[in-house]
Image (cartoon, grey):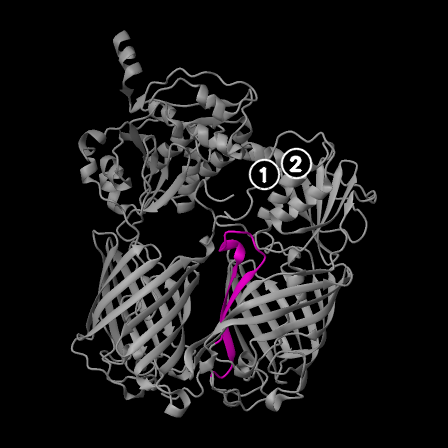
Amino acid sequence: MLLAVFLCGLLTCNGVTAQTLQLAHTDGERLSDWMLRQPSGALLYTPGLQWQVPSEREAQAKLKRKVLDALNAIPMASSTDKANLGKWVEALPVTGRVRLTQPDARWLQAHPSQDPVLKSDHKVAMPNRPTSVSVVMQSGGLCTVPHVAGAQVRNYLQACVPSQLESTDRAYVVQPDGAVANYGIAMWNQEAQAGIAPGALVWAPSRNSGISNELSLQLAQFLATQSYESLVANVGSGLAPYSGAPLAANASFTSTSTATSRSLPITASDWGFVGLLQTPSARMSPAGDARLSMSRVYPYERTNVFVQPFDWLEAGFRYSNISNLLYGPFELSGTQALKDKSIDFKLRLLEESAYMPQVALGMIDFGGTGLFSSEYVVANKRFGNLDASLGMGWGYLGSSGNVPNPLAKLNSSFNTRSADFGMGGTPAFKSFFRGPAALFGGVQYHTPWRNWVLKAEYDGNNYQNEPQANNRNQTSPFNFGVVYRPNPSVDLSLGLERGNTIMVGFTLRTSLPNLSVPKVSDPPTPKIATTRPQQAPDWVSTVADVTYMSSWVVQKIALHGSVMQVDIEALSGAHWNERLHRILTILHRDAPANIQTFELNLNDQGVPLTQRVVNREAWVKQNTQLVPPAEVVPAIVAVEPPVQTYQTVSNRTGLKLKQDKPNTPEWERTPALFGFGVVPSWQQNIGGPDGFLLFRVGLSVPMQLRISNNVAITGSLGLNLYDNFGKFKYTAPSDMPRVRTYLREYMTASKFNVPNLQITHFSDLAPNHYYSVYAGYLESMYAGVGGEWMYRKWHSPFAFGVDINRLQQRSFNQFFGFSNAGEQTGYRVTTGHATAYIDTGWQNTHLKLSAGRYLAGDLGVTLDVGKTFANGVSVGAWATKTNVSAQRFGEGSFDKGFYLRIPFDVMTTSRSGNVANLFYNPLTRDGGAKLNRDFTLFGATSPRSQRETSYMPAALPLNRGN
């Protein structure tokens, strides 16, 4: 008996090495220091470190009760399993464990905000390295098997529950550090997995168990609070009644028998949408993915831009270059090849499951000329590395007519498809799902070489009904291709199509919500001291450093007892919270020791827009040590700004600010009269007869002259550095006042111009009511006077505004005259709109609806629908319909377009308030044209928006950024 105990101290019992004696912690000691004081040796296992805090037990007890209640409520197939699982969970202790970001002593010392300060009632222990992994059984208890390097979930399930393996779709892995991940593990939803560490738990209920994904996640989260040592050591006891019996018969796997699970590779077709070669699939990219792709299969050269705003919607546009046809007469467009513009979308109708395929419906060339218009329904089913698709197409996709149109059974009119698309741009509803239909489909195979994907498809198009009778010879309806992915952002494609034509293509992709660049060009954020300064502050230095850290401008600093007020303006940039953090590091460094509260008044041109009230002690604590979640109090609270007086603010910080007015300011800025900057500029014209892309690259010099707190003169100078506008000869025809179609003349008249120069007064009329009046050269084509009023409550999802403007068209050279605007010389118009802004609260979607009079005097409505991701990147589309007929509007039928807005904060190495606004407008026409105002009340009052002040940088890998 004594020998067994001695051997258990040296070897492994139930897959866990006996615990090494560890030194106790002292009150106030850093966890990293405690870790470094422990006896050295390879047996200590830092990923399994347990930091247990009494204050966490209440929340974990609630989580445990929620799991038990959910288990009792579900109708599991086996009542015995249900009872045993419930008893097993009931027997687990509530530990109060808090997960660490990185359980490494040196890393914690380098990141003090993640390094806890231990208290006397905390428990902390570091286990010895386990040699096993345990599967949590549906019947309660654990099946413990040896850890094998490279083994994945299916290997451990095969060892413990082989009969359940093929009926299990999703597994939850609880790593020894408390991290929880879940993966699809079935043939239809298999996903790439992170390595499973020794001491991990695996929970993988069968699809027939009745246990939901939500319950499984909650159970995994509760298991993450447990000590692996304690769980495994109690196998066979009342705590864990299930022994590892299956191990003896099924745990003979080795690292050579393990296979790496892989996620389904999502690739683009020749047309840019997700699919095979010529045919679409029902697959979707992750929400936020964006792609630019180009393909060539003679005579078609396609340039495609697609975005996945939601996981159920794919949308984009395309330019097709038909290389063997001319754009138009030689005297108009020379030898330029014919171009076609189109807009596509695809909707997911049904998500894939164990027994059902994924199904999608899509339209090609939905809002274009209709040359390639198609509609389709397609289904996909995955079988491990093989993904099969089968669909039916109408229009271009179904031109072979290899099956009768099934909709003709409803009405014979579905047999006929109209070829008249009018002026283009208007959906041809009477043609949808009509005419010949064809089946199409194929397979995608992810080869054992992870960078290579093979494709084969049956094409529903026989190329005998091509646009403009440009028919092609097809020797085989089967197309074959290969995709090579040298890195996650690039695909290179090669194929054989129609049996006789080579296809080449490439795709560039990125994830919009994950765009982020370390700010290596900015000064690092100062280290936060746990002590407070004793010397008198140098406010000049404080103010300069605040601007250096954030680019925001301090207007005034005032002290009132234990409260420090700071008035700040020039609130630029997307990532507010990051800038606020950097500002607070400076204020804490310099503020007198008696200051307990920072009150940041955030204004624009003297107009109060929002406030941040900061509990100094709580903020310092949360940024210099890891605070258990239950003990976290809001250190920074957003509050509505007071109208005039220093009002009382009660909030969860426990602070109460007095109504008394502050004392004489400690520091106040002398108003700066003049400021300027230098930024790059870009102008473009796409798809015209003079050339596919005409562009100008230059510099813009924005300037501001402050007349008073609420009045400023702003403007910009433009300088052309390089362009290819020498080719720009064509002026589009128009049957309306040429309010925009003199684009060429405005873009080519001068290399130096003044696109904007105006005086603006901005203020508030009453709480939540704002106004501005302005006059001058309001944009590159128009000058005049105007005004705007807006109602916008603080943190409200709704805003409403009205603007009205009296304008005259400017001269082409964009200087100060009005005498040279062609037939538009002397053109005057009154324009204005009533606009509602709605933050829907649904999947970060926002709407803007405007109604009013446009530049050409037409009356109508503009709808703008957009989505903004958590890092501030926005995608959206707009459409305008006015009382101008499609025939009078001209090609395109009505104004529409897409936009992508990328804050410089997410794509440059320094923080910046600039935004890259990328617009795609298929055609520049005169109908539905709006004044492009440089200053809008919605933009000026954006600090009042809860959403627009909550954007954060996408997560970077550890140890990046500053």
Above or below residue 456? Residue 911 is above
Above or below residue 330? Residue 210 is above
Q: Residue furthest left?
A: 475
Q: Which residue is mark 2?
A: 589
Above or below residue 740? Residue 201 is above
> CA separation, marks 2 and 1?
9 Å
Q: Residue furthest top?
A: 2
Q: Quadrant of residue 958?
A: top left
Q: Residue at 40% x, 33% y: name it.
A: 86
Whether residue 208 sits left or right of residue 617 in the image: it is: left
Give yes or no for contact between labels 2 and 1 (Cβ–Cβ under 8 Å).
yes
What residue range appears in magenta? 892-921
Query: Can residue 603 be found in the magenta stretch?
Result: no
**SS label for mark 2:** helix
Q: Earlier in the sequence, mark 2 or mark 1?
A: 1
Viewer-side residue, 157 vs 901:
901
Q: Which mark is residue 298?
A: none
Total labels drawn: 2
**Disc 2 marks which amino acid?**
Arg
Viewer-side residue, 433 vs 625:
625
- Mark 2 Cα-neighbour bin, 10 Å: few <14, some 14–19, many ≥20: some
Q: Which quarter of the image is occupied by the N terminus?
A: top left
**SS label for mark 1:** loop
Q: Residue at 63% x, 68% y: name it.
A: 716
The x and y percentages for residue 384 are 24, 53
Q: Which residue is mark 1?
A: 526
Q: Residue at 45% x, 16% y: name it.
A: 23
The x and y percentages for residue 763 are 76, 62
The x and y percentages for residue 291 are 39, 63
